[in-house]
Amino acid sequence: MVARSSEVRQSAVRHSASPGVGGRRRRGAGRLAGLGLGGAALLVLLTGCDVGKTFGGFGWPQGGITPESHRMYDLWIASCIAALAVGVFVWGLIFWCVVRYRKRGNDLPVQTRYNMPMEFLYTIAPILIVSVLFYYTAVVQTDVTKTTKNPDVTVEVVAFKWNWQFNYRDGQGKDANTVASVLGTSEVIPILVLPTGRSVRFEETSKDVVHSFWVPEMLFKRDVMPGNIRNVFEVSSLDAEGAYVGRCAELCGSYHAFMNFELRVVSPQQYDQFLAAKRDGKSTQEALTAIGEDPYASTTKPFNTRRDTANFNPDDVAAGAGS
Ligand SMILES: [Cu+2]
């Protein structure tokens, strides 16, 4: 049966005009729960925790080797926890409303339009959440992209179709000099040797098109641009010795997928010896052997470019086509 409009209006007014002590208590409890969840999320944001490990990093790669990578990881985990807290709170409210206000008769449920405290809460709560997320994102981003005046090591990363050259520099900027260099070829993967515990500045430039310098364990990649743009970023230290694969992460042409390199993190003493050996004119492989390291890359290997065969139509080659 459809109620007449005058009955509906009276019923609605009756309900909304007298919410009673119980209604006020319920609203107060809801606000308290919201504040509690927000506070918990903030606490996690501030302190960081191991929840990420339990949930596989919420999709974020784990195993970063720089302090910067850990800060980005913590931000991601805290953001996920905050999003989940808000989500669980909203889901809870939805289910609570479904059960609490399920249809019991033909009376219209309590109408809460123009409820100023509610409207205020709906507006302020999202603004607060976004502000907190924005603040911590800005803090972490500023920290991760900051550069210093005197980093311990400066490397010029030169990308070209389709390999890498790493130049160890005696200062910053274009005018500094290269004191040693590692050049990749189709047969030998270039190995970028760097020390633990020292700040490293990467200055990137490309000889042709846009490439992208990416070591997954740094959780950071940055485009390598041609021309006068010299992209620069720093890591305050590398924390774990080892070999890490590096890749080009920008589609740059036919052999883009072959543009791998290796980052070899060694002790500061080994690094100094490596640089000294390179300065003495030794090859990269000889210098690596001199410091007791594997002379060749262990995380990736040169790809067979098959440039001398028609790799797309081998049958045509056999038949003599195109010769
Ligand atoms: Cu590339």
Image (tube, rainbow, N blue to C red):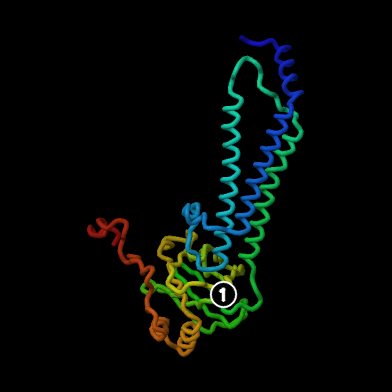
Q: Quadrant of residue 319?
A: bottom left
Q: Quadrant of the N terminus?
A: top right
Q: Position of residue 301 (x, y in %)?
A: 36, 69
Is 81 on the left-hand or right-hand side of 256? Answer: right
Type of amino acid at the residue the image marks with label 1: Val
Front position in the image: 93 or 131: 93
Whether residue 246 is visible here, answered yes or no, is yes
Front position in the image: 137 or 258: 137
| Label 1: how many Cα within 10 Å (few below 14, some 14–19, many 20+) | many
Is 188 on the left-hand or right-hand side of 28? Answer: left
Q: Position of residue 218 (x, y in %)?
A: 51, 66
Question: Going 36% across and 73% down the picture, which residue do you hit?
Answer: 187
Which residue in the protein does label 1 denote?
200
Q: Quadrant of the C terminus?
A: bottom left
Question: Going 42% across and 67% down the picture, which residue do you hit?
Answer: 260
Q: Where is residue 276 in the image (x, y as percent from the top left)?
A: 48, 88
